[in-house]
Amino acid sequence: MSDLPIISVTELVETLREVVETALPPCTVEGELSNCRRSPAGHWYLTLKDETAEIRAVIWRSTAAGLRFEPQDGMSVLATGGLQVYVARGTCQFIIRHLQPQGVGELELAFRQMKEKLAAEGLFDPERKRPLPRIPRRIALVTSPTGAAVRDMIQVIVRRWPAARILIVPVPVQGKEAAGRIAEALRSVTHLPEIDVVITGRGGGSLEDLWAFNEEIVARAIVECPVPVVAAVGHETDVSIADLAADRRALTPSEAAELVVPARGELRGQLLQLARRLERSLAGRLEQMRLRLSALRSRPVLTRPHLLTDDRRRHLDELAERGRQAVDQMLERRRLHLAALSAALDALSPLRVLSRGYSLTTHPDGTLITSADQVNADETICTRLADGEITSVVVSAARSDPPGGIPS
């Protein structure tokens, strides 16, 4: 058996860690990210690689909290940190203390990522934007109380519309705490009475100075604010996430003040113009009514109303006379028709025949006797005359030959 020393696995890995961690001081590694994954605890696990090699890397939560952007697969970076041996598994990994993207600045990359994320959620959609009130009663300024921007906004508002009431909600506009304070102030508007519109922003500065208005928490607070929000961040060339999320973007704080209140002189001119238009409209309407009244006054129905009643009276008389004549004519026609019917009925009446000397002989049951063959001797018969009836008994019945006929 060899005389070589025998050591445990732990001792072997501990020796490896001592050699690795002391042999290579902290350094900056250029490479490409892959397998990026964020754990529920907030740590980032990823791989640093180049064309021929790769190594596992970790960004602990404390470091990741300071990143302005999210690591993504394929991103070229400069990673500053050092090697560390994980004793429990005997593996070596690179602990990243600072991560900087290559080809584009860290803040620029963070801005692009945040813009894409919130745009995909619809926070920048024009359909979501709310109109500004025409004449706000109370305006909240969420900004630094000591900056030049707040003085410019107050001056413009007071000059253009002195009746507006201004409430300053003081917040820091740069630094680590700025974004959280701005978002908190925007959410507090719900508890402020009679606020009609909010202006938030600051004067110009570097991208780093303006960064609080690029934070996600501020953009979401602007969208959730119960009243319209105007963002005025930096100068004309500066575009922030807050500008994109706001209901209205102003190029400067002074322009924001001009957007939220009308100019007193301009409004007075508009009111005078409306008054003149109303006056002309009323004058035209009155002239139309005067002409119409004049035309009505000249009509005969108003100048000589008795003519209308006389015409109507004569017309009614004519209708009455025509109606009376029509009734008389109809009654005459009915009378003549009835007389003709009476004459026809009288000509056909059996009583008319009887009055000329004829009679009708019937059996007691009313059966008409038209032949001697219909009666027998000793039978009772009834004879109807024009002026009465005769009841008789048949002595004999014999049929006689018709005149000029041949005896049967």
Image: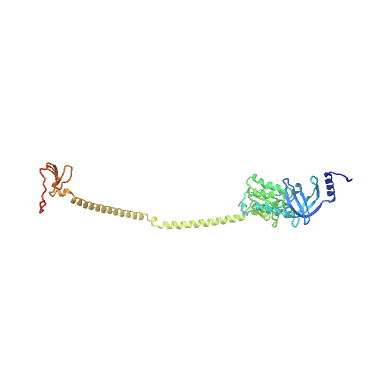
Residue 1 place in picture, x, y as percent: 88, 45
Render colour scheme: rainbow
Q: Pick the residue in front: 339 or 90.
A: 90
Is residue 58 left or right of 287 when viewed as pictured? right
**Residue at the (38%, 55%) spot, across then down:** 301
Q: Pick the residue in front: 25 or 175.
A: 25
Residue 34 makes an appearance in the image: yes
Residue 66 makes an appearance in the image: no
Quarter where residue 193 is shown: top right
Residue 339 place in picture, x, y as percent: 21, 52
> Looking at this rendering, what residue extends furthest in the right direction?
3
Is residue 285 left or right of 233 when viewed as pictured? left
Q: Pick the residue in front: 59 or 175.
A: 59
Residue 127 place in picture, x, y as percent: 61, 53
Is residue 1 left or right of 318 when viewed as pictured? right
Residue 126 place in picture, x, y as percent: 62, 54
Q: Pick the residue in front: 297 or 68.
A: 68
Quarter where residue 270 is shown: bottom right
**Residue at the (17%, 48%) spot, across then down:** 350
| Number of marks drawn | 0
